[in-house]
Amino acid sequence: GADDLRPASRPRTESYHGNAASVASHYNSRQEVGLERRDHSPIIGLKKFNNWVKSVLIGKFVGGEGQSRRRAGSKILDIGCGKGGDLNKWKLARISLYVGMDIADVSVDQARERYNQLRGHRFEAYFKAHDCYARPISEALPEEYKRRDLYDNVTMQFCMHYAFETASKARMMIENVSRYLRKGGVFIGTIPNTALLLERLEEIPEGQPLEFGNSCYSITFDERRHKGLYGHAYHFYLEDAVDVPEYTVDWDNFVSLAREYGLELIYKKTFNDILQEEQSSNEYGPLLGRMGVINEEGESSMDSDQWEAANLYMGFAF
Ligand code: SAM
């Protein structure tokens, strides 16, 4: 039955409608477990795979596009940076500036701490707690970090969908993404694949709970059909990771919104397609082993349930 899909540890939530404060407190309350504890996470394989996908996106798009593409020395704005889990990836991309912003102030402190402990290639960094979907980032940034055409890349990893609660949040988010991104710069991100989620929702027979998942995740919708482009909420539970309300991202609407702000789509792929395309490439194939996604025998560190959860996501670039 549907109840079997729900891991026992998952608290039942009365309402799926979140707000910025609850998102912040959810992420704040997830304490920094450190690399050692993280290695024991029941979904460590999935986490490693997600990190590999982000490394692929960073590698493909760091520095932006066009003749003036500059890989080393790139300047990066990370919106929804969380605890700074991508700092090492950007370090390896030999960037010169990283600005990280997130609504969860505890996470931002942890990101700053992680930066302070980085060894090797040095780059300038600035961290700031800010609600990037409700307020312009210009309010929170010192002059030197809000210059026109400053950033080669803006990155939003696993966080942009929270903005699709309302039209005004989504607009504020895109406004913040585009404002200081240079011409030819590239905006990259990862979000759940809404089309896939809605397909799964459609498959649920009438009268059944609007829920699907497996041993490591569950997704619960509170409405089968939603009028309008914003605020279509579902509750996403992922073992040892998230337990929060999220919002569907109507892809065509997102693309046209982005276009209004001068952003043109250049890349859109499911995580599965990214793996199929990049696993045998010279650049990202060997990285699968180095990042622990596959072992020396070439076996995946994800079980089939984690693999299904991984494929709920897609990556994009504008
Ligand atoms: N990007 C990080 C990563 O890939 O590890 C963190 C991803 S975490 C799943 C989602 C992040 O989005 C959380 O850190 C959360 O606080 C942040 N977030 C949600 N709403 C936000 C908002 N309005 N402004 C800024 N950050 C927000």
Image (spheres, grey):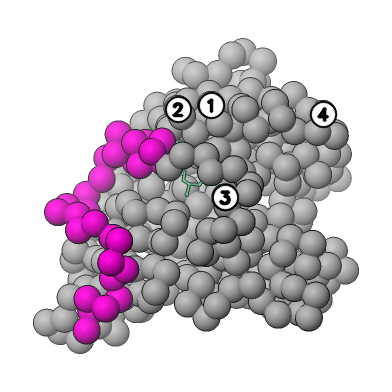
Q: Nearer the viewer, residue 47 or 230?
A: 47
User: Rounded to the nearest whole Å, what is the CA distance between mark 4 and mark 1?
Assistant: 19 Å
* Residue identifier under label 1: 109
Badge 2 is on which residue? 105
Q: Amino acid at mark 3?
A: Arg
Left or right of 14 in this view: 318 = right
- Earlier in the chain: of badge 3 and badge 2, it is 3
Residue 267: where, in percent of width, then height? 64, 62
Instruction: Specify few, some or many for label 3: CA neighbours under 10 Å numbering under 14, 14-19, or 20 or more.
Output: few
Give the magenta-colored segment's residue range.
1-29
Name the residue that disc number 3 marks: 37
Secondary structure category for the residue under label 2: helix
In this view, the mark in front (4 or 1): 1
- Three-letter amino acid code at the position of disc 4: Arg
Q: Nearer the viewer, residue 47 or 196?
A: 47
**In this rendering, does residue 26 appear at all?**
yes
Indicate the amino acid at tag 2.
Asp
Q: Which mark is residue 122?
A: 4
Question: Residue 65, labelled with which disc?
Answer: none
Evaluate if marks 4 and 1 touch, with contact meaning CB atoms under 8 Å apart.
no
Q: Quadrant of residue 228?
A: bottom left
Vertical comparison of 171 with 138: above or below: below
Label 3, secondary structure: give it. Answer: helix
Q: Mark 1 or mark 4, which is nearer the start of the sequence?
A: 1
Confirm or deny contact between disc 3 and disc 1 (CB under 8 A). no
Check the image and name the residue furthest to the top: 143
Residue sitting at x 45%, y 62%: 192
Q: Residue at x 34, y 54 (%)?
A: 243
> For the residues marked 2 and 1, what is the alpha-carbon distance in whole angstroms?
6 Å
